[in-house]
Image (spheres, rainbow, N blue to C red):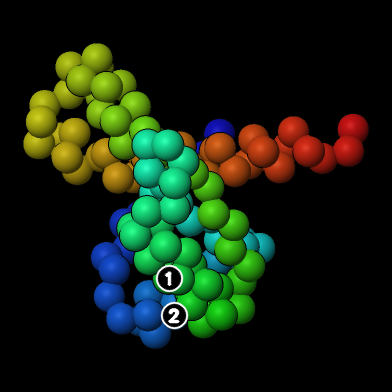
Amino acid sequence: MASPYSTIVRAKLKHNAAEIRAIADEEGAAGLVIGLPLGIDGDLVPAAQAARDWAHALSAATGLPAAMIDESLTTSEVQALLINADMTRARRAAMVDKLAAAQILQMALDAVKSTAPS
């Protein structure tokens, strides 16, 4: 089960790449999983193209392969879960991005597991 690690504030690519590479080295990560914000119909909207461009640049800067996972509805699903858990708005705001990222990672891990030979 994937769990939140930490929040990395987006900054210049060089700074983010160094921070992410250090975490990957420390944790033994073999690659990156990056959310792809597709449109409601699965279209490649401008935000999705920007995410793809950033993922390619980050992959090149870290030397780690990057997989992109459709992140559609992850934030709203996490928010609904936290509301049902009777969490305050302030606490939800602090948790939603981390939990949505963990959900995206879990989706990637599940996809790898389902395609692995038995």
Characterize the local packing of mark 1: few (<14), some (14-19) or many (20 or more) Cα atoms within 10 angstroms.
Answer: some
Residue at the disc numbered 2: 18
**Label whose residue precedes the other's in the sequence (2 or 1):** 2
The amino acid on which the numbered mark 1 sits, given as a three-letter code, is Trp
Q: Is residue 17 or residue 57 the one in the foreground?
A: 57
- The answer to whether 114 appears left or right of 88 in the picture is right
Q: Is residue 19 left or right of residue 9?
A: right
The residue at the point 71 percent across, 42 percent down is 112
Identify which residue is drawn at 39% across, 49% down.
Answer: 37
Image quarter in which the N terminus is found: top right
User: On the rendered image, what quadrant is the C terminus found in?
Assistant: top right
Q: Position of residue 82 (x, y in %)?
A: 25, 24
- Please, is residue 87 above or below residue 60 in the view? above
The residue type indicated by label 2 comes to Ala
Q: Which residue is mark 1?
A: 54
Residue 69 vs 110, above or below: the answer is: below
Residue positioned most to the right: 118
Q: Position of residue 24 (x, y in %)?
A: 55, 66
Of residue 17 and residue 39, the one placed in the foreground of this image is 39
**Element assignment for label 2:** helix
Give left or right: position of 28 versus 7.
right
- Residue 105 placement (x, y as % from top left): 52, 44
Q: Position of residue 45 (x, y in %)?
A: 37, 53
Tell me what residue is drawn at x 29 percent, y 68 percent.
Answer: 10
Instruction: Determine the image quadrant of residue 32.
Output: bottom right
